[in-house]
Amino acid sequence: MAEAKKPGGNETGQRNEGEGNRTAARQYNEAQRRFIKSGKVEEKAREAVEAIEGDERQELERAEAEGKRHIAGEDPKLKR
């Protein structure tokens, strides 16, 4: 037995608002307001900086190790 669509909606009952979905924008904006009021903005910003710096450090270490592997395998006769 097929489930009937809700008027103005799709199979999930959500209304298709097209581009510029006002309902989603309103929900997102309200979530942002709640987050700001929570007082955790500075804490989360510091965590983000630490995560980015950690990722950059790891990437530099990987690049350095890769470079060292290439140097170790070079033919000494090529260096004149």
Image (tube, grey):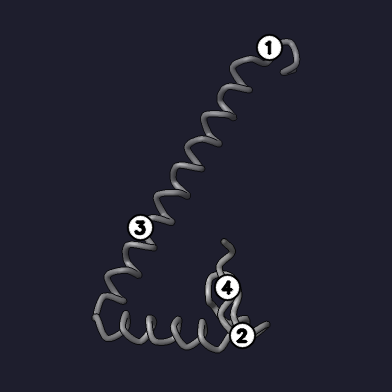
Q: Mark 4 points at which residue?
A: 4
Q: What residue type is labelled 3?
A: Glu
Q: Which residue is drawn at 44% across and 46% down?
A: 57
Q: Using the numbered discs, state the Cα–Cα distance from disc 4 to disc 3 in whole angstroms.
A: 50 Å
The answer to which quarter of the image holds residue 80 is top right
User: Looking at the image, is mark 1 or mark 4 earlier in the sequence?
Assistant: 4
User: Looking at the image, is mark 2 or mark 1 earlier in the sequence?
Assistant: 2
Q: Which amino acid does label 4 sit on?
A: Ala
- Name above or below for residue 34 compared with residue 51: below
Q: Which residue is drawn at 61% across and 85% down?
A: 8
Q: Using the numbered discs, state the Cα–Cα distance from disc 2 to disc 1 in whole angstroms.
A: 74 Å
x, y percent for residue 36: 32, 83
Q: Which residue is drawn at 56% across and 25% down?
A: 68
Q: What residue type is labelled 1?
A: Pro
Q: Mark 3 points at which residue?
A: 50
Q: Check contact, mark 2 vs mark 1: CB within 8 A.
A: no
Q: Report helix, strand or loop for mark 3.
A: helix
- Name above or below for residue 71 compared with residue 33: above
